[in-house]
Amino acid sequence: MIENGGTEQAERPDTPVSGDLGSSPRVTLRRITGRDQDEWLERVRAGVDQHRARMTLPATPEDFQAFVDRFDEGRTAEGLLVCLRDTGAIAGNININSIIRGRAQTASLGYAAFAPYAGRGYMTEGLGMVLRHAFEELRLHRLEAQIRPDNHASIRLVQRHGFRYEGYSPDLLFIDGAWRGHGRWAITNDMAGIVPSVPHPTLPGR
């Protein structure tokens, strides 16, 4: 998971433009589709050394199609792209994974910034829109990001949005041929100040 540094503060998203899930002054948020294959593969090839030690991104047409097929618009997972507002170019992706309903109403986040757009604050704006989408539209209560301790840029990204550190889990995720320990960072809708007026229907009454 990669997001390089910067001093930008988290901003509230503007009103979305048609077809987008959110929009800020510089980027829009939308769902990934099969039509994004060529640009996605180009971005992954350009940043293969950047991402290898932290996460595995689909790098072939077959892997990309399997990646897209697992997303179901927020029932169990949702794949989202952060795109430049003026050109539509893909600056990064943010996935809402492993959605659990019932008493948990929780999910995990995975994300990557693509060269040459890393370090410009686009993912900061994009993550703000993802939080609003997850807490308002999907009506989740909690999101967690698992981050390697040496991934300082990614830690700064979630800190900008008020995530709290909840501890370290050794051997948590299998990445680049080995089990890697990660810090657990989390945020709830209360912490973000984005609480839906009506809870998700799968939340028990008591």
Image (cartoon, grey):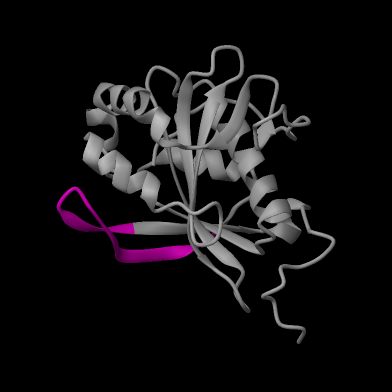
Residue 143 magenta-highlighted: no
Q: Which residues are magenta?
A: 165-181
Would residue 11 be visible to someone looking at this image? yes
Q: Is 86 in front, or is 124?
A: 86
What is the x, y in percent for residue 7? 60, 26
| Residue drawn at point x = 42 percent, y = 57 percent | 183
122, above or below 34, in the image: above
Q: Is 76 in front, or is 147?
A: 76
Horizontal arrangement in the rendering, residue 98 relative to residue 57 (left or right): right
What is the x, y in percent for residue 115? 37, 21
Horizontal arrangement in the rendering, residue 99 relative to residue 22 (left or right): left
Which quarter of the image is occupied by the C terminus?
bottom right
Quarter of the rendering containing residue 130: top right
| Residue drawn at point x = 41 percent, y = 29 percent | 35
What is the x, y in percent for residue 205? 77, 83
99, above or below 133, in the image: below
Q: Residue furthest front?
A: 35
| Residue drawn at point x = 53 percent, y = 18 percent | 88
| Residue drawn at point x = 64 percent, y = 52 percent | 134
Which quarter of the image is occupied by the N terminus?
top left
175, above or below 48, in the image: below
What is the x, y in percent for residue 45? 24, 25
Would residue 59 be visible to someone looking at this image? no
Residue 177 magenta-highlighted: yes
Quarter of the rendering containing residue 33: top left
169, above or below 23, in the image: below
Horizontal arrangement in the rendering, residue 172 relative to residue 190 (left or right): left
